[in-house]
Image (tube, helix red, strand yellow):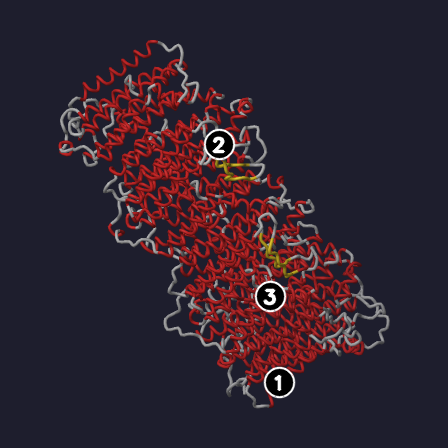
Amino acid sequence: MTSVPPFALEICIVCVGIFLLMMDCFTKLDKRSIGLAAIAGLLAAFVLSFLTGPMPSHVIPPSFYVADAPALFFKRFVLLSTALTIALALDYAPIYERFIPSASPQAGVGEFFILPVFTCAGLMWMVSAADFVMIFVSLELVTVTFYVLVASMRKNTGSLEAGVKYLILGALSTGFLVYGITWVFGITGQTSLEGIRQQLPLLTEGSQAAVLFGLGLVLVALGFKVAAVPFQFWVPDVYQGAPTPITAFLSVASKAAGFIVLLRVLEPFFTISSIERKLLIVLTLLAALTLVYGNLAAMPQTNLKRLLGYSSIAHAGYLLIGVASFRGGPSGPAIGFYLAGYFLMTFLAFLVLQHVAMASGGDDISDFNGLGSRSPVLALGMLISMLSLAGLPFTVGFLGKFLIFEAAMRSQQYLLVAIGAVTVASGFYYYLKVVRAMYWQPAPDGASSIPVPGSSKFLIGVFCAAIILLGIFPQPLIAMLN
Amino acid sequence: MSPLFCLVILPIAGAALTVAGTRPRDTAVTAAALNFLASLIIFGWCKPDAGYQFVSSFPVIPSLGIHFTLGADGLSVAILLLSTAVTLAAVCIARTPAKHSNWFYASLLLISAGAVGAFASVDAFFFYMFHELALIPTFLLIGIWGSGDRQAAAWKVTTYLALGSFILLIGLIGLYLSLPVNERTFDMRRITELAASGEARPQGSVYLLLILGFGILVSLFPFHTWAPQAYASAPAPAAMLHAGVLKKFGLYGILRLVTPVFHPDVAAQFNTLLIVLVLGNILYVGLVTISQRKLDLMLAYASVMHMGYIFLGLLSWKTLGLAGAALMLVAHGLSIAALFALSGELRERTGTLDFGELGGLAKAMPAFGLLFGFAAMSAVGLPGFANFAGELLIFFGAFSAGAPSKLGLNEFQIATVVALWGVVISTIFMLRSYRRIFMGPIGDKWKALPDIATVPRLCVTGLLVLLLIAGFFPQAVLNYVVPALMWP
Amino acid sequence: MNAATAPWIILFTPLVSAALILFFGRYSRKLSAGLAIGGALLACALSWWLFFQPGEVGPNQLLWINVPDVLTVPLGMTIDPLSRTMLVVVNTIASLVFIYSLGYMAGEEGYWRYFGGLALFLFSMLGIVLANNFVMMFIFWELVGLSSYILIGHYYSRPSAADACKQAFIVNRLGDFGFMIGILTLWFATGSVVFGEIFAKVPLLESQGHYLTIACLLIFCGTIGKSAQLPLHVWLPNSMEGPTPVSSLLHAATMVAAGVYMLARVFPLLVAAPIARDFIAWVGALTCLAAGLMATQQNDIKRILAYSTISQLGYMVLGAGVAPGPDVPMFHLFTHAFFKCLLFLCAGSVIVALHHEQDIWHMGGLKSKTPITFACLVVGTLALSGFPGFSGYYSKDLIIAWAVIEKPILGWIAVLTAGLTAFYMFRLLAVVFLGTPRSDHARHARESPAVMVVPLILLAIPAWVAGYAPVEGFFFHLKEPEHVPEILHYALLAMFVLGAGLAILLYRNPAKDPVVIPLFANRFYIDDLYNWIVKNVQDSLASLGGWADRWVVDLFVAQIPSRFTWACGYILRFLQLGNIQAYAFFFGAGVVGLIYILLA
Amino acid sequence: MQLVLFWVFAALMLIFGAAVVFLRNPVSSALSLVMSFVFLAALFITLDAFFIGVVQVLIYAGAVMVLFLFIIMLLDLRTEQPRRVNIGAWIGGAFVVFGFIGLLGKVLSSAVPFNMQKPPISNPQISDVSAVGETLFRQFNLPFQIVGVLLLVATIGVVVLSKKELK
Amino acid sequence: MTPTLGHYLAVSGLLFFIGLAGVILRRNILIIFMCLELMLNAANLSLVAFSRYNLTLAGLPNYNGQVFVFFVITVAAAEVAVGLAIIVALFRAKRTTHVEDLNSLKF
């Protein structure tokens, strides 16, 4: 059986993107067909990803680009999440259209479907990157497209404000990233992670400090990407302001890619015990702060999109527990599983949120009042999503947390486990606030039932089933990660 | 496929069907009735001293030693029977609410499914998972269809139990990690074996985590404050299921995962502390119960108080105490379910459970008064009801527990004496409430109250008959239970 | 049928009646009464039959609880002279009272409840009599308490009755508290709960210092509660709120005597614990005296009899404390059962005749209107007061004689009480039957129906003759004390004459009580003390607990943590200022902090 | 000589850099930025990185700065009105900056090779343009491609964001 | 005397901090953006210095560093383009480039 080299996937995606641009430019097709074509292309690449063979080393040196199992897993992850983002965007297009200055109907909507494809390419490169240059460049590709996507609803000041905030803080973190890479490169003379791993044991104590300085700055930039406290400030604001599909995309794909890069970057440094010790402190602290801040600050929120922003920080905290739990054996699979679960439940939440927001004109929790009777399907979807986010058993969210905490206990991260326990309880509080609104509260006067298109119903069904099935039989996913 | 699977899947299927839109009450009653029948058959089928039976296993995360394993021994089938019986009673007694009636019945069935699944699980991981399944239905039941300050109660019980079960989860992980590296598993049978052979030596910290986790779930003092509020606010069937069945999860868990696993010396380090807590449950909560002015709160506190006895039996680490705890666990489940059923009925009729407003109701509702009297007497631990046999065994077990002390009485014996005083206390509050509600002159507005309807009457009678059978022939239950407690 | 199965039938017949009454009694009054009386008669017949079966009956038990090697609790029958006699007494009196109830309860509502309760009581009482081990005895001990609760609370709509039944149950449970600890201590030392096996280990127990003494005292707590000894006597007078037949059967003749029966049952233990016996004797004597004093100032006809019961029970307990064998107190129990039952039934007859009037100061001059009742009451009074030739004379004097020999102080207390007994009984007699009627009801009183009068007459006979030597020899094997001081008999006679004479003199025809002693009338204020304790100690503690649960425990384990968490969240969210510069600053500060830690 | 040049260039670069921050008029800031970059390019050249120096001048001074100025003109930004001084920001900024300087100083002082003199290049004849090119196109080919995509995306993005009316 | 690596790094560090200070202190988004450019360029200076001082085995500067500078410049240019576009869009919508006017999303 013939196999395609892994890097063909990215090429494929870029080609799809360019093809879509041409389509947008030179045909008068309905813009929705662009979105559908994009989804088709992404899904085709997803299928293709199962046909990939080993990496031919003569084309791209493995010190730049790795295509190991996690990388492949996350490529698929990214592909699917992009496809879903575009699916969400298809539903969101009418709203989007209202907030862009277009001369003709549907003008400018095409890019809304096409840019995520390029983001997807960037993300895919990111998860394969094994060299700081690669990391920097692919990360910037992702970031720059996100700047555009976040700010693209130009007539909506919220979107613009979010865009500016993301831009300034993103650029600031880029500055730190570059400066950090500079130092790591400067001391080790290497940009590839493999090269750095070889150089690290040779360092004197003084130069170790300099490497740590650089690494710290890189950590800051990646912490920004994954929304770790205290680099999370952009998250709630940007999530709230950005177009809903983009928020979902940001919170899932961008975070996932951030985490795999974080793991890859840290991995060589764990081999040096003096550095490892310090990293342990820093990671533990980051995880603890992130857990506490994300969960606690989410409690008083009333806007669901913003709440999901804080929730995203909170989940970053749990994932950081996984990152900080490297001592008891590899925690990568646990993180991968958690992210996969997070992907399912977050997308489901945004899917429902988007429909409710489109119907009721707002995305406050109070807009969900009485959803249980207004639209049982949406309510059920949201219910399952919230329960999974809260970490209730028989959902994938619980297993994710379980694996993370198992890893943490194995690594004797008892402090984080304790904080985790408390924050899980507070998590119940704010996720159940949504459930309460849906089922306890009466629907506002005059609220009619919300129509849900068949495709969305199908998606909700698939997501619910996946959340529960993977919550009971996670083995396929776990096997894929190992 | 294990017949237990059908026991677990029936209520879940029932819940799914009700949500999908079948006639909720009929579906729920059918599912509960079928489940009760099934558990009866399994109860008859089970050979008490043959260890786990009906075992079927399905690998879920083999790399972590997690399998979806169902199985039951004498102890499990006894508790399964309790669960399905209480479920049937609860579902039958439920009054179909106007709002979201399908969710109402689905929630009830889900709570039952959680409990049944937990009691039928051999794998500690699924044991835990099934219990948590009931959390959200409880939240919905209290929040949507509750009474009084239902919102606060729902929040409290949910976050509290979430926290408790999370502590428990951490304890379970700790237990898991204390097994030898290549033997790590969540299979309770294997864990017990490893502990018995000395290959696994779980530490005191794990013990404390497990006891604390289970303790919060069974409202161990001082972590009991969620319970009264929740039970008082919950609709009657929910309170029945939660107090009668679901809360037994923690005690059952201790019987399965703590007493057979930990070395007595490990446990002994914490005995004094835990005994103080248990006495807090019995004495302090007992006193608090006396001070209650409303029936629902009083019953809720009473159920918290009785947890103290069971805990005492568990702490004794003696077959006698454990057997007593197991028996009491079944008995308390039945009696508190009957009591909550009646208090719910009473609320439906009178609209109030305040002692000050009620009085002399036995005049208007003699059958109701009689049933309530029976249930109250069972809660008081009167001979003839299984509660008495359970308490008796617990007292015997606890009195003979612990190391001999120079002072004459060791801590367990002192605790037993104090716990016996608790029997007096529970008599006081139960009889007081009976006096205030059913005795004395009847108020004018209650004179026309109709007596208890047929369905609830049959339900409560059924529960009481079970209690009486187990009370007259405790050995019948013990024959099932004791072999399960005789770990290698 | 043989001697082994008979006790089982005796025991469970009343239970079956009770269960049938519970399910079907509501539909027919006759059925309820019939079932109860039929059951009682069957049990009565069988117990007489059993009484004449010779010889020992071998092991005769089922295993109720059996946890191998640790605890075995059988349900077993003890068939020995003690239980045989007691069976006969209980069943005979019960049958009579059941029949009497037909008349007394005619027209009352809750017929099935009443007869169901009686049947349940009979079952429980027989269980105590037949039990061969402590746990079984405890089980029926509690069930007796339950039936007493049901029967006292028969008129539950009356607040006083409702309170009384509650109090009776709770006070009994107080006694049971000690009883159970006693059982536990005995089991802990001997590994068994069966009487025979424990008695076999008495030498072992004796070797353990005061262990046995303490155990016996704890066991005795059961008696204190059940037999209404000081200080737990308060429930018995209040229990008079129940229907009079109940008072006569439960609260005079049989149930309250269970405590004494139990002491007789465990006599081998008591013998080995002299200190405990001393204590028992003291409690008995003091109860005897105190109750006698209280009785002198009561105005309710049933309450007078209730205090008299307490006083007589005190005699029996005293007997258990001083006599060399269990037969001495049992003999008094035997005679007392008849005459006290008779007295109560007479009182009941009077009460019915006066349309449920119980205050003796509303009675008077009934001698001619209810002659049979009067005659029976006189028999009962003489028996109770220990008038020579009547049953009480033989049994009570025996106890007093033993007491004077073994514990002279207690003996003389008992003698004094005998005088008090005569005084208060003749007071009752004089006020109720002599003089002139003090109310309309009394003026128009008529004799009770035959169904009530016949049992009176039937009971009057044993009340008179039960103490005669042939009867006594038939049931008991008494050991007459030697070296009884001669003066004792004269003293007792003098006390009787003094008491009776004084009473007749004082109470021949006053309109109200010429003697007022508040201390006695208020029962030494013991009831008030209890009320005070319940109200001010227990209920205050409970309220404090209730307050603390909400404002301390809940505050610390739930409110404060959750509010604190929420507040933290509320404060933390304000870090999210919305201002880019602030974000940049926090970001920078985070970087500095992170690097600082890394480099530290 | 080199040291003198270094100090001159460095000082000017820093001064102009500081001017960017402290001048109120956006145009002056932009021009200071250009100047700062020019001296930065000069520093690059003192490090024998001629190609990078040239690129720096071309791209930054030539393209980026023009862009900045265009935008300033387009938006018609005036001199910033002196608003009330945000003391918090100043203290915070000072804290962060000096904290950072302290940390960097620590790294600089503790790390050994920092007092290292400039080593001679073994073969000064090799043109750094060709060397950079070699490295870029051979070794760093993939990132180069990605940057291409990045620029494409940026182009699209700019159109999406700034076109007055999308057609 | 030639300047040492330390000199270059110190100067570049100072430039970086000037940029950082500007980001924190200035209120005009455009200026903040310029300051961000300063920071990137400061990093570039360090990179070039490192590449010049840490020669490869062949005795040549480590051109990897210079290539990285090239990438940084390119990316920065792209970022500037997009960033300025956003600023223009913002100005069109809100007639302001002041950060303090951007505070509708908070808490």
The answer as to whether the residues below labels 1 and 2 share one chain is no
Question: Mark 1 — on which chain does it sit?
Answer: A
Residue B205 image offset from top left, x and y in percent:
61, 46
Front-lying residue, C18 or C443: C18
Task: Indicate whether C309 appears above or below C555.
Answer: above
Q: What element carries label 3?
A: helix
In this rendering, which labeled residue sits more in front, label 3 or label 1? 3
Residue A48 image offset from top left, x and y in percent:
68, 77
Front-lying residue, A73 or C435: C435
Q: Label 2 near label 1: C-beta < 8 Å?
A: no
Q: Please name the amino acid that badge 2 sits on.
A: Ile
Numbered badge on residue A21: 1
In this rendering, which labeled residue sits more in front, label 1 or label 2? 2
Q: What element carries label 2?
A: helix
Q: Please name the amino acid that badge 3 sits on.
A: Leu
Numbered badge on residue A50: none
Spatial CA distance of label 1 from label 2 is: 91 Å
In this rendering, does residue E97 appear at all?
Answer: no
Question: Mark 2 — on which chain does it sit?
Answer: C
Residue A136 image offset from top left, x and y in percent:
68, 71
Front-lying residue, A22 or B343: B343
Spatial CA distance of label 2 from label 3 is: 57 Å
Identify the image quadrant of residue D30.
Answer: bottom right
The answer as to whether the residues below labels 3 and 1 share one chain is yes
Q: Which residue is drawn at 55% across and 59% down?
A: A293
In this rendering, does residue A83 appear at all?
Answer: yes
Q: Label 3 near label 2: C-beta < 8 Å?
A: no
User: Mark 3 = which residue?
Assistant: A470
Numbered badge on residue C183: 2
Q: How many marks?
A: 3
